[in-house]
Image (cartoon, rainbow, N blue to C red):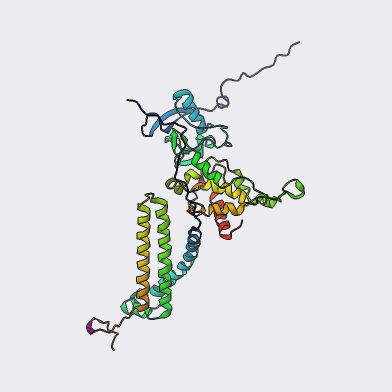
Amino acid sequence: MATKTELSVSVGTPAEEAGLKPFKVTLNIRRYNPETGDEAFWQDFDVELYATDRVLDALHKIKWEQDGSLAFRRSCAHGVCGSDAMRINGRNRLACKTLIKDLDITQPIYVEAIKGLPLEKDLIVDMEPFFESFREVQPFLVSNTPPAGGRERLQSIAERERFDDTTKCILCAACTTSCPVFWTDGQYFGPAAIVNAHRFIFDSRDENAAARLEILNDKEGVWRCRTTFNCTDACPRGIQVTKAIAEVKAAVVRGRP
Amino acid sequence: MSTVIENPRSPYTRPARKKRRFNIEKWAWLFMRGSGVILVFLIFGHLFFNLMLGEGIRAIDFGFVGGKLANPFWQWWDVLMLWLALIHGGNGMRTVINDYVTGQKLRPFILWTLFAIVAILIVLGTLVTFTFDPCPITENIELLPSFCNA
């Protein structure tokens, strides 16, 4: 005796099944090809998208269906790896966290590479200067004393809370490349490096705060910050970047965290 | 025509950050905060005394200014305002220049020009405030203001 079960046969994407209607969106993408030696130029693409789509989906559609030469970085595509920071409608965002429905689609959506770092191709920049500054602030726990009881380095909830905000950084470079001082002067450490220094300076288990404060008490260190709040606006993780920089400034003045 | 294709993995080089043993940035930053607060008090006090008290703006003439600069209280008030405002503004200009002038020869030139202007204005202003005499000893009596009847 076989029971006949009604199976709904699924066809298409979840958006189609949910009965959503696609609409046409124009993307203006700043292209650059180092092999031709030409200047960067704007190219527009029309894509059919759903309201549930993100800018990253639009870029995928272009790359997979229209122009395979479009170059951009992405890894996890869910706002965790920090690979796809780009300038969307003049603001630094993660393409994978920017929903099409949150943008004004009566106008073309402008997508370009983040500014202030050397452009390699299309939406890809050389991140090395950014990571170099990051490495310089010693973004790792330094302790010269053995932990109490030879086991764990214990920390109270309040001590952990002190630097909780800056642990969220995913190193996407959205903050550093939104900073006007960084645009004009590539020597500035940049918000991301200071955020990651903050994460260890205010960690009660760390013993190297003095060295980090000394590094950031540089002409190109925290004093370069003009508190324009571009970094706080740009951060896809909602880190209060300008506040963290201000706390590091205060710590440099005090000479201790 | 063949194009030379640069090695895409060639590392980006930027001028190394110079290690300085001492820099004034921390003190400049603290000065800006301190002087800013004091200047708000000094400038609004200055404006209130000159424009609001007594006859207000109609009282301002050569004699009014001469009278103020004869009083040590206003001499020190004005000199303090002069020094703080010029150094505060000059330091602000210095940071703008450091942010936006990238030419390795142009930047020091502009910075030194700025320094010279600030220094000259401070020296001249201080000199005038403390040595100003509305009734100098002179042959040409008719050049002196009317209240100098000595």
Residue B117 magenta-highlighted:
no
Which residue does the image show at 35% across and 63% down from the upper left?
Answer: B116
Picture coordinates of residue B17, whole percent (x, y): 48, 48
Q: Nearer the viewer, residue B141 or A88?
A: B141
Q: Is residue A173 visible?
A: no
Quadrant of the rendered image containing residue A89: top left
**Of all residues shown, which one is farthest toward the top?**
A1
Q: Nearer the viewer, residue A215 or A61?
A: A215
Picture coordinates of residue A172, whole percent (x, y): 53, 40
Please state the total of marks drawn on the protein image.
0
Q: Which residues are magenta?
A: B138-142
Instruction: Tell whether B66 sits left or right of A95.
Output: left
Q: Is residue A231 positioned above or below B64 on the image?
A: above
Q: Nearer the viewer, residue B22 or A34?
A: B22
Picture coordinates of residue B21, whole percent (x, y): 51, 56
Name the dominant secondary structure of the magenta segment. loop
Q: Nearer the viewer, residue A219 or B143?
A: A219
Which residue does the image show at 41% across and 77% down from the upper left?
Answer: B74
Q: Is residue B134 positioned above or below A242 on the image?
A: below
**Of all residues shown, which one is farthest toward the right?**
A149
Picture coordinates of residue A218, whole percent (x, y): 51, 53
Image quarter hosting the N terminus of chain A: top right
Image quarter hosting the C terminus of chain A: bottom right
Q: Is residue B32 visible?
A: yes
Instruction: Tell whether A206 sits left or right of A105.
Output: right
Q: Is residue B81 positioned above or below A233 on the image?
A: below
